[in-house]
Protein backbone atom coordinates (compact mmCIF):
# COMPACT_ATOMS: atom_id res chain seq x y z
CA UNK A 1 0.00 0.00 0.00
CA UNK A 2 1.30 3.43 -0.90
CA UNK A 3 1.26 6.23 1.67
CA UNK A 4 1.43 9.99 1.30
CA UNK A 5 4.43 10.08 3.64
CA UNK A 6 7.01 7.66 4.96
CA UNK A 7 6.97 9.54 8.27
CA UNK A 8 4.50 12.06 9.60
CA UNK A 9 5.31 13.99 12.77
CA UNK A 10 2.61 15.52 14.97
CA UNK A 11 4.29 18.47 16.69
CA UNK A 12 6.89 20.95 15.53
CA UNK A 13 8.98 21.29 18.67
CA UNK A 14 12.64 20.41 19.13
CA UNK A 15 12.05 16.65 19.14
CA UNK A 16 9.61 16.64 16.24
CA UNK A 17 11.71 18.89 14.03
CA UNK A 18 14.93 16.96 14.73
CA UNK A 19 13.25 13.66 13.93
CA UNK A 20 11.67 15.01 10.75
CA UNK A 21 14.92 16.48 9.44
CA UNK A 22 16.97 13.38 10.25
CA UNK A 23 14.47 11.09 8.50
CA UNK A 24 14.38 13.39 5.46
CA UNK A 25 18.18 13.35 5.28
CA UNK A 26 17.99 9.57 4.90
CA UNK A 27 15.59 9.93 2.00
CA UNK A 28 12.21 9.60 3.69
CA UNK A 29 9.24 11.68 2.58
CA UNK A 30 8.27 13.57 5.73
CA UNK A 31 5.41 15.79 6.84
CA UNK A 32 4.97 17.79 10.07
CA UNK A 33 1.77 19.16 11.58
CA UNK A 34 2.16 22.11 13.94
CA UNK A 35 -0.84 24.29 14.73
CA UNK A 36 1.25 26.85 16.64
CA UNK A 37 4.65 28.35 15.88
CA UNK A 38 7.63 26.13 15.12
CA UNK A 39 10.26 25.49 17.77
CA UNK A 40 8.16 24.14 20.62
CA UNK A 41 8.34 25.03 24.29
CA UNK A 42 12.05 25.80 24.50
CA UNK A 43 12.01 28.39 21.72
CA UNK A 44 8.59 29.95 22.24
CA UNK A 45 7.68 29.80 25.92
CA UNK A 46 10.58 28.27 27.81
CA UNK A 47 14.35 28.37 27.65
CA UNK A 48 14.88 31.17 25.13
CA UNK A 49 12.41 33.87 26.24
CA UNK A 50 12.98 33.03 29.90
CA UNK A 51 16.75 33.44 29.57
CA UNK A 52 16.32 36.79 27.84
CA UNK A 53 14.15 37.98 30.72
CA UNK A 54 16.62 36.56 33.22
CA UNK A 55 19.47 38.53 31.62
CA UNK A 56 17.37 41.71 31.86
CA UNK A 57 16.57 41.07 35.53
CA UNK A 58 20.27 40.91 36.49
CA UNK A 59 21.21 44.40 35.31
CA UNK A 60 19.94 46.37 38.37
CA UNK A 61 22.22 44.41 40.67
CA UNK A 62 25.12 44.80 38.25
CA UNK A 63 24.56 48.55 37.97
CA UNK A 64 24.71 48.81 41.74
CA UNK A 65 27.79 46.60 42.05
CA UNK A 66 29.63 48.51 39.31
CA UNK A 67 30.17 51.55 41.56
CA UNK A 68 32.48 49.41 43.70
CA UNK A 69 34.67 48.86 40.66
CA UNK A 70 35.12 52.49 39.73
CA UNK A 71 32.06 53.03 37.54
CA UNK A 72 29.91 56.08 38.15
CA UNK A 73 26.37 55.51 39.38
CA UNK A 74 23.55 55.51 36.85
CA UNK A 75 19.83 56.30 36.99
CA UNK A 76 18.71 53.86 34.31
CA UNK A 77 14.99 53.19 33.90
CA UNK A 78 13.43 49.87 32.93
CA UNK A 79 10.73 49.64 30.22
CA UNK A 80 8.76 46.37 30.34
CA UNK A 81 7.06 46.84 26.91
CA UNK A 82 10.46 47.27 25.28
CA UNK A 83 11.70 44.00 26.79
CA UNK A 84 8.57 42.11 25.71
CA UNK A 85 8.91 43.48 22.17
CA UNK A 86 12.59 42.49 22.03
CA UNK A 87 11.75 38.96 23.19
CA UNK A 88 8.99 38.63 20.57
CA UNK A 89 11.36 39.84 17.83
CA UNK A 90 13.96 37.23 18.76
CA UNK A 91 11.35 34.46 18.83
CA UNK A 92 10.09 35.37 15.36
CA UNK A 93 13.68 35.22 14.11
CA UNK A 94 14.12 31.72 15.55
CA UNK A 95 10.75 30.57 14.18
CA UNK A 96 11.97 31.63 10.74
CA UNK A 97 15.19 29.66 11.17
CA UNK A 98 13.25 26.48 12.00
CA UNK A 99 10.94 27.04 9.04
CA UNK A 100 13.97 27.45 6.77
CA UNK A 101 15.62 24.28 8.09
CA UNK A 102 12.52 22.21 7.36
CA UNK A 103 12.12 23.73 3.93
CA UNK A 104 15.74 22.98 3.01
CA UNK A 105 15.24 19.41 4.25
CA UNK A 106 12.18 19.05 1.97
CA UNK A 107 9.87 18.47 4.92
CA UNK A 108 6.28 19.52 4.24
CA UNK A 109 4.80 21.59 7.06
CA UNK A 110 1.07 21.65 7.79
CA UNK A 111 0.08 24.58 10.07
CA UNK A 112 -2.83 22.56 11.43
CA UNK A 113 -3.93 20.24 14.21
CA UNK A 114 -3.69 16.53 13.41
CA UNK A 115 -5.87 13.73 14.80
CA UNK A 116 -5.90 9.98 14.19
CA UNK A 117 -8.50 8.33 11.96
CA UNK A 118 -6.74 4.96 12.06
CA UNK A 119 -3.19 3.57 12.55
CA UNK A 120 -1.94 5.11 9.29
CA UNK A 121 -4.42 7.91 8.60
CA UNK A 122 -4.65 11.40 10.05
CA UNK A 123 -7.11 14.26 9.76
CA UNK A 124 -4.86 17.28 9.31
CA UNK A 125 -6.95 20.42 9.31
CA UNK A 126 -9.76 18.61 7.47
CA UNK A 127 -7.39 16.94 4.99
CA UNK A 128 -6.91 13.17 5.08
CA UNK A 129 -3.19 12.27 5.16
CA UNK A 130 -1.66 8.79 5.28
CA UNK A 131 1.78 7.75 6.54
CA UNK A 132 3.71 4.53 7.07
CA UNK A 133 5.02 5.74 10.43
CA UNK A 134 3.49 8.44 12.65
CA UNK A 135 5.48 10.11 15.43
CA UNK A 136 3.65 11.86 18.27
CA UNK A 137 5.76 14.75 19.58
CA UNK A 138 3.13 17.14 20.91
CA UNK A 139 4.85 18.26 24.13
CA UNK A 140 2.78 19.65 26.99
CA UNK A 141 1.17 22.77 28.39
CA UNK A 142 0.55 24.27 31.84
CA UNK A 143 -2.56 23.12 33.70
CA UNK A 144 -4.33 25.50 36.08
CA UNK A 145 -5.36 23.75 39.32
CA UNK A 146 -9.12 23.68 40.05
CA UNK A 147 -9.12 26.11 42.98
CA UNK A 148 -11.40 29.09 43.69
CA UNK A 149 -10.26 32.25 41.91
CA UNK A 150 -8.01 30.47 39.41
CA UNK A 151 -9.78 32.31 36.59
CA UNK A 152 -7.92 35.45 37.69
CA UNK A 153 -4.51 33.80 37.40
CA UNK A 154 -2.20 33.38 34.41
CA UNK A 155 0.16 30.54 33.52
CA UNK A 156 3.88 30.67 32.88
CA UNK A 157 3.08 30.86 29.13
CA UNK A 158 1.13 34.10 29.55
CA UNK A 159 3.81 36.09 31.32
CA UNK A 160 5.68 36.63 28.04
CA UNK A 161 2.69 38.55 26.67
CA UNK A 162 1.76 40.83 29.57
CA UNK A 163 1.48 44.39 28.18
CA UNK A 164 2.49 45.93 31.52
CA UNK A 165 4.83 44.84 34.28
CA UNK A 166 2.91 43.72 37.40
CA UNK A 167 3.65 45.78 40.49
CA UNK A 168 2.91 42.77 42.68
CA UNK A 169 2.81 39.07 41.82
CA UNK A 170 2.05 35.81 43.60
CA UNK A 171 3.80 32.73 42.24
CA UNK A 172 1.94 29.48 42.99
CA UNK A 173 4.48 26.68 43.02
CA UNK A 174 8.07 26.12 43.99
CA UNK A 175 9.41 24.09 41.09
CA UNK A 176 12.16 25.42 38.86
CA UNK A 177 9.73 27.34 36.63
CA UNK A 178 8.10 29.07 39.58
CA UNK A 179 11.47 29.87 41.18
CA UNK A 180 12.90 31.25 37.95
CA UNK A 181 9.96 33.56 37.33
CA UNK A 182 9.95 34.67 40.97
CA UNK A 183 13.60 35.70 40.59
CA UNK A 184 13.04 37.35 37.21
CA UNK A 185 10.12 39.47 38.37
CA UNK A 186 11.84 40.36 41.63
CA UNK A 187 14.98 41.43 39.77
CA UNK A 188 12.92 43.66 37.49
CA UNK A 189 11.29 45.39 40.45
CA UNK A 190 8.03 43.50 40.99
CA UNK A 191 7.07 42.73 44.58
CA UNK A 192 6.90 38.92 44.60
CA UNK A 193 5.33 36.45 47.00
CA UNK A 194 5.93 32.77 46.33
CA UNK A 195 3.52 30.16 47.70
CA UNK A 196 4.72 26.57 48.13
CA UNK A 197 3.19 23.59 49.90
CA UNK A 198 6.36 21.73 50.85
CA UNK A 199 9.73 22.42 52.37
CA UNK A 200 11.85 25.42 51.39
CA UNK A 201 13.81 23.16 49.04
CA UNK A 202 10.89 22.38 46.69
CA UNK A 203 12.88 22.11 43.48
CA UNK A 204 14.93 19.26 44.91
CA UNK A 205 18.19 21.23 44.79
Image (cartoon, rainbow, N blue to C red):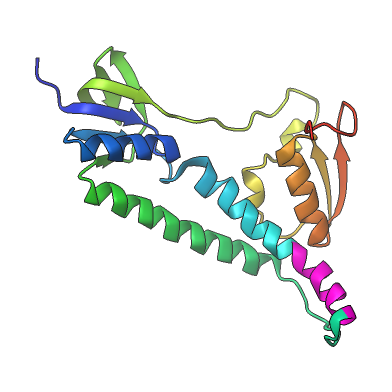
In this view of the protein, which residue sits in the foreground, 91 or 144?
Answer: 91
Magenta stretch in the rendered image: 58-68
Q: Which residue sits at x=36%, y=40%? A: 17
Q: Does 121 appear above or below 36? A: above
- Determine whether, in the image, residue 49 is placed left or right of residue 123: right
* Residue displayed at 19% across by 26% down: 6
Q: In the picture provided, is 98 more to the left or to the right than 151?
A: left
Which residue is farthest top?
Answer: 118
Image quadrant holding the N terminus, namely top left
Q: Taking 127 as reference, is 35 left or right? A: right
Counting from the top left corner in percent of width and height, residue 86 is at 57, 66
Image check: 122 left or right of 152? left
| Picture coordinates of residue 173, whole percent (x, y) | 79, 34
Looking at the picture, tell me which residue is in the foreground, 121 or 28: 28
- Residue 114, picture quadrant: top left
Of helix, strand and loop, which mostly describes the magenta segment? helix
Place residue 15 in its image quadrant: top left
Residue 88 at x, y percent in the picture:
53, 59
Q: Residue at x 86, y 49 (%)?
A: 192
Residue drawn at 78 percent across, 55 percent down: 185
**Residue 34 in view, yes or no:** no
Amino acid sequence: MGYDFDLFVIGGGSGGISSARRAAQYGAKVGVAESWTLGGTCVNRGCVPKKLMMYASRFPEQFQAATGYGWSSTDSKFAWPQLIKAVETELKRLNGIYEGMLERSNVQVFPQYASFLDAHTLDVGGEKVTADKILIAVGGKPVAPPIPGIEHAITSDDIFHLPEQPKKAVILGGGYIGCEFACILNGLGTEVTQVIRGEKNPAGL
